Image (cartoon, rainbow, N blue to C red):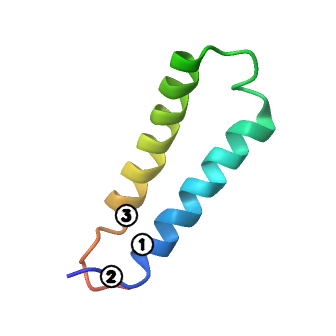
Amino acid sequence: MLDPLHLPVTAVLIGIVLFGLQRSGSLAGASRGRRFVNQFAALFVVLLVLNLLWPCGSGTG
């Protein structure tokens, strides 16, 4: 069963992380592969923490 709030919260967090990476300049001048690795790592950590704190389908949403 899906939580009705988990999906939008996840989408907002993804947007915030990607926007923050762009605005911070940490991806400026990086190769395409390096940008992918940095974005993947940042998203992985944020989504891992979200899902550890609030598992999808836990019924808390």
Q: Quadrant of the N terminus?
A: bottom left
Q: Earlier in the sequence, mark 3 or mark 2?
A: 2
Q: Which residue type carries mark 1?
A: Leu
Mark 1 = which residue? 7
Mark 3 = which residue? 53
Mark 2 = which residue? 3
**Residue drawn where x is 44% and y is 81% of the image:** 5
Q: Which residue lies most toward the left here?
A: 1
CA gap between label 1 and label 2 equals 7 Å
CA gap between label 3 and label 2 equals 14 Å
Q: Are marks 1 and 2 in contact (CB under 8 Å)?
A: yes
**Residue drawn where x is 61% and y is 48% of the image:** 17
Q: Nearer the viewer, residue 53 or 31?
A: 31
Q: Are marks 3 and 1 in contact (CB under 8 Å)?
A: no
Q: Which residue type carries mark 3?
A: Leu
Q: Is residue 56 positioned above or below 52 on the image?
A: below
